[in-house]
Image: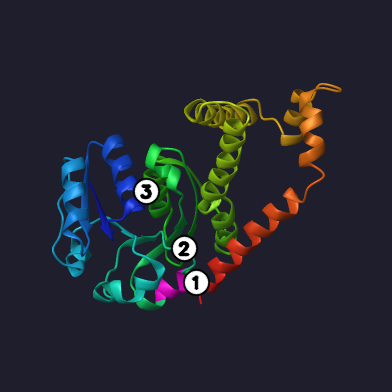
């Protein structure tokens, strides 16, 4: 029986809890949140939920504890857990392992950057261990995270870069999807059709790159017939500053992640 605690019952915690509930029959979800509405959502969505009425109760009631409140609220939120001596997994952007080790000196800390596709079982996450974390701790963390998608072990100094690519990346890709949908509508397609074609194209492109182990450049060449439509469109795209814009977007995200850590 695995008892998985959540300090904070927001969307990401809800998604991870759902993945665990679906994949592990022997799991119990132990959430705490100041919002009764969020707790009721957990209880109505999953059959194996045993909420607690105070954060301090999580100390003795879970095998692994996800710290899933907003970074700005974290210091006050974990104060009742200062004596926690188990495995704690932070999914708070920007906050370093050293912060948690200072606030929870007896805990074994793993820092994770998940992303919102976790909600549909397609998460891309990076995780890094703190001092004292055992191989069994990492195996359990990986087992839970991979129930919701893909999780890879990285060095902590790489977590901010993971934030820029996969943590915030869905918002940036959604903006690109929005632009394609708008272009389709402006070209005469019905909005729903433009949306369906755009999303399937994005999904299919990712699948092709993954399953055929292709580089982006190889796929570009595959689609680009000489003097064809793709080449004509590339002339516009590749003469723009799209590459620099994306690089600066990711860099600013990483910068902000580091700011949050201070």
Magenta residues (range)? 97-101
From this viewpoint, is residue 86 visible?
A: yes
Which residue is at the front of the view, 253 or 60?
253
Does 99 lie within the magenta span?
yes
- Circle 1/circle 2 CB separation < 8 Å: yes
Tag 1: Cα neighbours inside 10 Å, few (<14), some, or many (≥20)? some
Tell us which disc is closer to us: 2 or 3: 2
Distance of mark 2 from mark 3, alpha carbons?
21 Å
Q: Residue 18 carries which label?
A: none
The residue tagged 2 is 93
Closer to the chain start, of discs 2 and 3, is 2
In the figure, is residue 108 to the left or right of 36?
A: right
The residue tagged 3 is 140
State whether residue 121 is above or below residue 51.
above
Which residue is at the front of the view, 65 or 231?
231
Residue 181: % across, % down? 56, 35
Residue 99: % across, % down? 44, 75
């Amino acid at each position: 029986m695995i008892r998985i605690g959540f300090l904070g019952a927001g969307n990401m915690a809800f998604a991870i809890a759902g993945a665990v509930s679906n994949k592990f029959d022997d799991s119990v979800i132990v959430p705490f949140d100041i919002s009764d509405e969020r707790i009721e959502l957990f209880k109505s969505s999953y059959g194996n939920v045993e909420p607690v009425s105070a954060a301090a109760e999580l100390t003795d009631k879970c095998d692994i504890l996800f710290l899933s409140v907003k970074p700005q609220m974290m210091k006050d939120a974990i104060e009742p857990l200062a004596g926690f001596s188990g495995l704690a997994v932070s999914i708070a952007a920007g906050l370093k392992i050293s912060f948690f080790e200072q606030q929870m000196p007896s805990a074994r800390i793993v820092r994770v950057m998940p992303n919102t596709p976790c909600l549909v079982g397609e998460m891309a996450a990076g995780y890094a261990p703190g001092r004292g974390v055992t191989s069994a701790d990492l195996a359990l963390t990986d087992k839970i995270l991979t129930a919701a998608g893909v999780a890879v072990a990285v060095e902590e100094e790489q977590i901010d870069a993971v934030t820029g690519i996969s943590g915030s990346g869905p918002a940036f890709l959604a903006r690109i999807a929005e632009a394609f949908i708008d272009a389709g509508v402006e070209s005469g397609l019905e909005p729903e059709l433009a949306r369906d074609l755009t999303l399937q194209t994005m999904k299919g492109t990712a699948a092709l790159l993954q399953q055929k182990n292709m580089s982006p450049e190889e796929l570009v060449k595959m689609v680009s017939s000489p003097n064809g439509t793709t080449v004509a469109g590339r002339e516009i795209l590749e003469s723009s500053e799209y590459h620099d814009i994306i690089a600066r977007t990711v860099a600013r995200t990483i910068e902000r992640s580091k700011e949050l850590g201070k």
